[in-house]
Image (cartoon, rainbow, N blue to C red):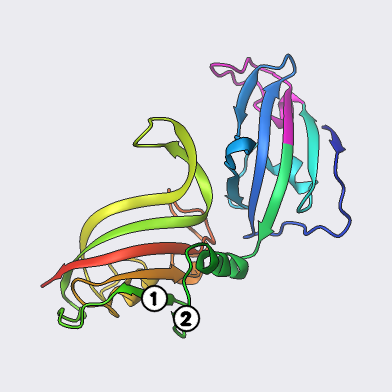
């Protein structure tokens, strides 16, 4: 691999496993054919959990500290090899331009959620769950263990992931990873521990924010949607409990 660091910062933070890296990048063939990119003008940062997956970006980013940018030329053996895709011929040399904007630990991400969504004076439990009611309903029935609970929810990462915008139909980087309505039995392990804990603090008709460290979310294993070691943010509403 050939590379050049354009803005070296000797005091910049280096990424470690489980850190979240937010960056801009542009991927092209040597003839200039654009393969993929983020839109810096729109602030569309890409994010990923360092060490969670193996991909073409890992090696170049390992040479960059927070605040640095670089140009990288990857031989096919370090890129897509003999595989061919719509715009990528087999054995293609790949050019990457990358700017690392931030590197955040899990603890920093939990604080970032509170700052971004203006969550002040939350309740913090011994498990690390950060809980804040947005809408209270003192007359609503308290959720208890064993009840069938119906909730509306939106789940978010601390960074954007590429997805289709339902309104415009365009590809955008957005922090939400799932949203909808579902029913589960409270307090029985049917959902992740942090979600269970938060819902059991609520009454029917209430809305709240649940911010949870990865240890009470999907942990070191993650799942098909959630990368390992991901702290998560949920906006939830208890619709009913029977």
> Which segment is the magenta one?
75-97
Q: Residue 189 appears in which quarter of the rendering?
A: bottom left
Q: Is residue 82 magenta?
A: yes
Position of residue 47 measured from the top left corner of the image (x, y, whole percent): 59, 48
- Labels 2 & 1 near each other (Cβ < 8 A): yes
Residue 121 is marked as 2
Q: Nearer the viewer, residue 116 or 215?
A: 116
- Residue 42 percent location from the top left of the image: 57, 38
Quadrant in the rendering for residue 204: bottom left
The furthest residue to the left: 242
Magenta stretch: dominant secondary structure: loop
Magenta span contains residue 182? no
Q: Is residue 97 visible?
A: yes
Residue 238: x percent and y percent? 22, 68
Q: Is residue 218 visible?
A: no
Q: Earlier in the sequence, mark 2 or mark 1?
A: 2
Instruction: Please give the count of numbered marks on the rendered protein.
Output: 2
Image-based side of 98 in relation to 197, left or right: right
Q: CA distance from mark 2 to mark 1?
A: 8 Å
Choose between 126 and 82: the one closer to the eye.
126
Q: Residues within 10 Å of mark 1 (few under 14, many from 20)?
A: many
Determine whether the residue tagged by mark 1 lies in a helix, strand or loop.
strand
Name the residue rendered at 79%, 52% in the picture: 65
SS at mark 2 in the image: loop
Give the labeled residue for mark 1: 132
Q: Nearer the viewer, residue 172 or 88?
A: 172
In the rendered view of the protein, which quadrant contains the N terminus? top right
Residue 27 position, x and y percent, is: 67, 28
């Amino acid at each position: 691999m050939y590379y050049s660091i354009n803005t070296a910062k000797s005091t910049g933070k280096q990424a470690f496993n489980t850190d979240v890296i937010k960056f801009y990048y542009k991927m092209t063939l040597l003839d200039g054919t654009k393969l993929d990119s983020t839109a810096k003008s729109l602030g569309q940062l890409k994010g990923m959990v360092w060490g969670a997956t193996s991909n073409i970006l890992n090696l170049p980013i390992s040479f960059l500290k927070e605040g640095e940018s670089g140009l990288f030329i990857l031989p096919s053996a370090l890129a897509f090899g003999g595989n061919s895709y719509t715009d990528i011929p087999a054995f293609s040399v790949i050019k990457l331009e990358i700017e690392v904007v931030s590197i955040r630990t899990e603890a920093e991400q939990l604080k970032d959620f509170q700052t971004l969504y203006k969550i002040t004076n939350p309740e913090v439990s011994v498990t690390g769950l950060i809980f804040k009611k947005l809408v209270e309903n003192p007359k609503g029935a308290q959720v208890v263990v064993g009840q069938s609970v119906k909730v509306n929810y939106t789940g978010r990462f601390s960074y954007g992931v590429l997805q289709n915008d339902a309104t415009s139909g365009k590809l955008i980087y957005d922090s939400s990873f799932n949203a909808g309505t579902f029913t589960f039995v409270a307090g029985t392990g049917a959902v992740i521990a942090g979600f269970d804990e938060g819902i059991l603090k609520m009454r029917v008709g209430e809305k709240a924010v649940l911010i949870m460290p990865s240890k009470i979310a999907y942990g070191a294993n993650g799942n098909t949607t959630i990368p390992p070691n991901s702290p998560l943010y949920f906006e939830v509403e208890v619709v009913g409990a029977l």
